[in-house]
Amino acid sequence: MRVSKRVMGLGTESAFEVLARVGQLEKQGRNIINLSIGQPDFKTSENIVEAAVKALRDGMHGYTPAPGIKALREAVSEKYLLEHQISVDPNNVLITPGGKPVIFFVVLMFGDDDSEILYPDPGFPIYESVINCSGARAISYPLSEREGFSITADEILDRITSKTKLLILNSPHNPTGAVSSKKEIKKLIAGLINYPNIGILSDEIYSKIYFDNLTHASLIQFPEIRERTIILDGWSKSYAMTGWRLGYSIWPKTLIENATRFAINTHSCVNGFVQMAGLEALNGSQDYLKNMIVTFRKRRDVIVNGLNSIRNISCVNPKGAFYVFPNIRKTCKNSLALQDDLLNQEGIALLAGSSFGSKGEGYLRLSYANSMENIEIALERMKSYFDNLSK
Ligand code: PLP
């Protein structure tokens, strides 16, 4: 049997493959420090768990409305009013099982065979994968270390052609932790005014995870592009709820009906009790989240300093998410070889930069969603590995 061209276009997310390999090694009795997967190592806060349990006990076992339960869509809308002073119509909010389906919906909505879609390199590998599946041409724009991996407006605008249908942006950014510079965002938006038919997918899944007193500047706040911007966000990273599969998106009024059809045709609706947990996450105390971010910030400082003290490695200081993206060019080894060596020889699972696009070669991605103790051990092991490598 032969699968369709579209399915042949699908790529993968190597984090899940490395995770499987870690599982195999652990079964063999190896002690692996896992810095590969992008999920908070915190448990979901107790009040959120309780809200789900209560909903189950109360009999919330059936289908729910396809776009999401009204109370949760309203809570998302209120959050935007409170945090960004932006009025969002709850009818334009779509609740999904995680943020990922939104990428699929948006890319399929804009990606015809003769169209082009712009996405970041390095970037979340699912963008390129889904664009290839849609039949559209995947056109990457580079993010450079020199700019702290922030977007550069000209690099994006220069790649726009008459075929460009969609631009994907992501800040805070996976895999670098970069936060897009406000100056470049403004410049980009000013440039995009000349291309009113290009849709924008703003992936803001790390919107709560910022350091150094920075706060999130959602693209929803720019009226110039509001009517063609889709916001992707959710609970996975911000509320340590990766396994619950709960995300949301905000759509222009003109597209929400199409988006809802995607929901009806794929997952139908999201589990009611999970949505009740999401409601509690938004409405309940935010202290747990604040503590999580303080912990991430401390770890970021340790891991960035530690990496910069290793021979032939340098690492920029990211302002968000929970990733670092150190430069390994001076080691003269490619990133995949280092991923394998560090896993097999040193028991450290991390990801080759090349799994995030060709511009990711020369880098590694480490997720510091692991304990300080493990991070310190990993840094020691890496130090001795790279010391030996340069002997
Ligand atoms: N977007 C980015 C940039 C991500 O890193 C991830 C998850 O790693 C997602 C979207 C998907 O999030 P979710 O787990 O909610 O589907």
Image: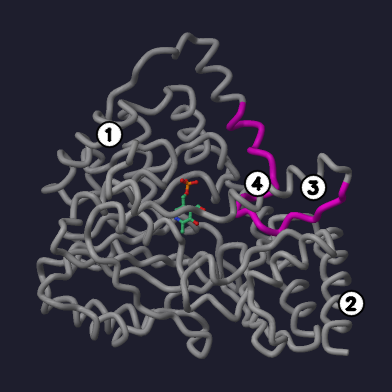
Q: Earlier in the sequence, mark 4 or mark 3?
A: 3
Rendered image: mark on residue 263: 1
Q: Which residue is mark 2?
A: 384
How packed is label 3: few (under 14 Cα within 10 Å), some, or many (20 or more)? Answer: some
SS under mark 4: helix
**The C terminus is located in which quarter?**
bottom right
SS under mark 3: helix
Q: CA distance from mark 1 to mark 3?
A: 38 Å
Of residues 291 and 96, which is closer to you in this image?
A: 96
Q: Which residue is mark 3?
A: 25
Prevailing secondary structure class for the magenta stretch in the rendered image:
loop
Q: Which residue is mark 4?
A: 288
Left or right: 300, with 53 as reference point = right
The image shows residue 373 at horizontal and vertical percentages of: 86, 59
Looking at the image, is mark 1 or mark 4 nearer the viewer? Answer: 1
Looking at the image, is mark 4 or mark 2 nearer the viewer? Answer: 2
Query: Which amino acid does the dot numbered 4 rest on?
Result: Tyr
Q: How many marks?
A: 4
Q: CA distance from mark 2 to mark 3?
A: 21 Å
Q: Looking at the image, which residue is at 61% across and 74% down?
A: 325
